[in-house]
Amino acid sequence: MRSIALLALLGVHALAGCSSGGTGAPGPDSADHELAPPPPGAGVQYRMASTVGPGQEIERCMLVVAPPEGLYVRADEVRFSPGSHHVVLYKTDYREIPTETSEGIPVDATEVHDCNNGATAAWDITGVVAGSQSYEGDSFLGELPDGVALRVEPGAVLVMNTHYLNTTPDPLETDARVNLYTIPPEQVEQEAGMLFHYNPFIRVPANGAASARMRCRVDEDISLVRVQSHMHRRGVGFAAHRVREDGAMEEIYANEAWEQVPAKVFAAPLEVKAGEALDFRCDYVNPESREVAQGLTTRDEMCMLIGPYFPRRPGLDNCNGAGGVPAETWIGTGAATCAETLACVSAAESDADVFGCVVDSCAGAAEEVSGFLRCQMTGGHGACDEACAEGGDGCAACVAEACGEEVAACEAARCE
């Protein structure tokens, strides 16, 4: 059995935003990306400017350091010049700015630099602070309720990331700005988290259609402030549901746009109780003569659910369990049994093949399919770390043995 390494947009990777409510912070006309910084004492602004060449698609990053006293962020506001697919401000665990990327590339990270494999490949990302995929101004965080704030640790290193595509024959001058509006620590009653749920199992056939669906269980009560989707240009539909303990599904958000994405701002925070779940699905139509799979560029596809909530629950931001182990349930839209899906994964020659195996699995075996995937992705729940560090056939043999219970459950599962 092949051991697979899958992208974790932290789980985390990628972007979002439009709201029926404002940020509560002063801002420019929506067509103007020249956003003024917050007033002194009311927050901070982070800014990136660069030139994108004719016909160029590029992701760029810049690392910044949060104030020594830290930040309690009550709202964000984002503006950027048209042409960007997203602007995101990420958290890290760095205590100082590194001098080389996670890929071993020396860089002055305090300056704008290329990170074309994505910010999460270049840097050790742990979460999301703010961002937007709407140059007209809608953002991830929006405005939080009174007494609720997202925490940025004192002196934390943050990664600002843009993704531009210049379709013109001329150089494109870009300018991206993120404002974080803050409140004093004594006004904070509850810490907010940011859902950044990412489904890596996407494959859309050439000149065809497909869907990607994922579910994340909520183990402690939370309140959602707003939610929004993220897809690329083949995305034609998105729906998110709250799943009750009895399995009943209640739609909380639906959208057909992949750019200038609308956010759903709840009139009162939406309560999700312990034992319930958040379920989301992306639908795609691919007009191209080539297969499209999950990935970071506009040639690829994504499927995400994004939104702030409170109180923050460890792991829930990225749908991780204890120790950072993936806790997602990936729900196929096909008819393959879990045993057939296991055989498909074992024979896969690429990540895209694995993605397709999961998409083609039946919904009724989702728990068992997800169980063996989680076991593979974590090297047999950590039992094979040493064997897999050495590479070779020993890794696959170890994972096959360590995941024996999950494989047995998968082979016994039915689609009904």
Image: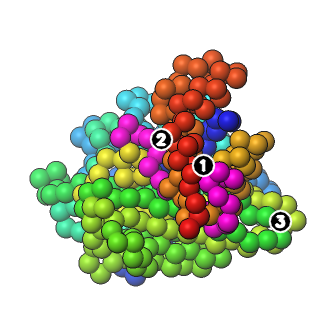
Q: Badges 3 and 2: C-beta atoms under 8 Å apart?
A: no
Q: Position of residue 227 (x, y in %)?
A: 42, 70
Which corner quadrant of the image does residue 247 belong to? Answer: bottom left
Could one spot residue 306 in this view of the protein?
A: yes
Q: Which residues are magenta?
A: 322-341
Residue at x 79% of width, y 64% of height: 205
Q: Position of residue 217 (x, y in %)?
A: 38, 58
The CA span between labels 1 and 2 is 36 Å
Please state if 265 lies on the left or on the right of 279 as rendered.
left
| Residue at the spot 57% in from the left edge and 51% down from the top edge | 412
Q: Nearer the viewer, residue 19 or 183?
A: 19
Q: Reply above or below: 57 against 114.
A: below
The amino acid on which the numbered mark 3 sits, given as a three-letter code, is: Ala
Asked whether residue 338 is drawn in magenta, I would say yes
User: Split into 4 quadrants, where in the image is the N terminus?
Assistant: top right
Decide whether residue 292 is among the magenta residues: no
On the image, the x and y values in percent for residue 264 come to 42, 77
Residue visible at 62% across and 38% down in the picture? 5
Which label sits on residue 125? 2
Question: Which sits earlier in the primary sequence, circle 3 or circle 2?
Answer: 2
- Foreground mark, 3 or 1, reads 1
Lower sequence index among marks 1 and 2: 2
Q: Which residue is mark 3?
A: 206
- For disc 2, the neighbor class at 10 Å (few under 14, some 14 to 19, many from 20) is many
Residue most extreme to the front: 412
Secondary structure found at label 3: loop
Distance of label 3 from label 1 (alpha carbons): 31 Å
Quarter occupied by residue 237: bottom right
Q: Amino acid at mark 1?
A: Glu
